């Protein structure tokens, strides 16, 4: 009987360990983003160039990012970006690489395809930490993702760039299944200063 219990215990431990592979954790994080419908969250970016904080709304590949310094809308094809520094709105069709830096869903899918991953030694209680490195030459050299064990949603991403710079993205205050109109992800001129120039760079 004791031998049977020991065997069952070891089997359960083995299954639990298998369930916590970095690949599966990232798959679960992508699924959580997809299944949560329209998501809103608070974000904070810290880097050597300064800090930035605001709100982000995501629905699949679409997103809207609003802060004092920057406002950005992406409807799945077209991006409108306003910068306090230039005080103009630029309209572009962003590349996949552009989207990696602003859209968590695009970044997560890219990580799954183009990065190798391992369980990170640096852990945060209540989170699963993954370290990622690109499979081939990239402007990103290393990524650390901290994903909540409870929700499978991304909490912290620490990204090291190939030029030596690095930044940390922190997402908090998630709200899922938000009922927001499609216009949420298209440019709203009422959210930028009156008379702001709109430049079409497509």
Image (cartoon, helix red, strand yellow):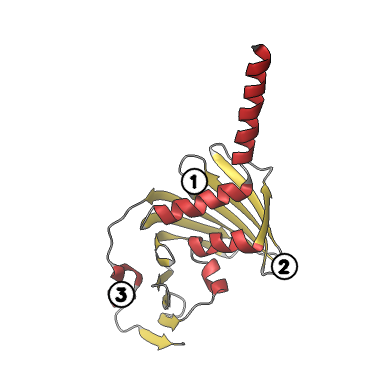
The residue that mark 2 highlights is: 136
Q: Is residue 178 left or right of residue 117?
A: left
Pair 3/1: label in front: 1
The residue that mark 1 highlights is: 152
Cα gap from disc 3 to disc 1, whole angstroms: 32 Å
Residue 68 horizontal/vertical position (percent): 40, 66
Q: Earlier in the sequence, mark 2 or mark 1?
A: 2
Cα gap from disc 2 to disc 1, whole angstroms: 27 Å
So how many labels did they put on this image?
Answer: 3
Cα gap from disc 2 to disc 3, whole angstroms: 39 Å
Labels 3 and 1 touching (C-beta < 8 A): no
Which residue is depicted at the point 45% across and 54% down? 33
- Residue 42 visible in the snapshot: no
Residue 2 horizontal/vertical position (percent): 66, 12
Q: Is 194 situated above or below 58?
A: below
- Residue 168 visible in the snapshot: yes
Secondary-structure class at tag 2: loop
Residue 102 horizontal/vertical position (percent): 50, 66
Q: Is residue 129 left or right of residue 163?
A: left
Categorize mark 2 by other alpha carbons within 10 Å: few (<14), some (14-19), many (20+). Answer: few
Secondary-structure class at tag 1: loop
The residue that mark 3 highlights is: 188
Which residue is depicted at the point 64% across and 36% down? 17
Q: Nearer the viewer, residue 7 or 188?
A: 7
């Amino acid at each position: 009987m004791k031998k049977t219990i020991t065997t069952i215990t070891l089997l359960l431990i083995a299954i639990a360990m298998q369930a916590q592979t970095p690949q599966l954790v990232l798959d679960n994080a992508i699924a959580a983003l997809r299944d949560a419908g329209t998501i809103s969250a608070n974000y904070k970016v810290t880097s050597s160039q300064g800090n930035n904080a605001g709100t982000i709304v995501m629905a699949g590949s679409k997103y809207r990012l609003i802060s004092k310094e920057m406002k950005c809308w992406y409807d799945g094809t077209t991006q409108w970006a306003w910068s306090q520094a230039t005080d103009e709105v630029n309209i572009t069709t962003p590349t996949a690489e552009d989207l990696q830096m602003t859209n968590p869903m695009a970044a997560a899918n890219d990580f799954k395809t183009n990065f190798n991953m391992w369980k990170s030694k640096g852990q945060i209680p209540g989170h699963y930490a993954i370290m990622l490195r690109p499979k081939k030459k990239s402007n990103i050299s290393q990524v650390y993702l901290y994903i909540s064990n409870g929700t499978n949603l991304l909490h912290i991403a620490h990204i090291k760039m190939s030029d030596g710079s690095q930044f940390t993205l922190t997402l908090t205050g998630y709200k899922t299944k938000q009922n927001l109109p499609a216009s949420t992800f298209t440019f709203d001129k009422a959210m930028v200063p009156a008379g702001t120039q709109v430049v079409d760079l497509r």
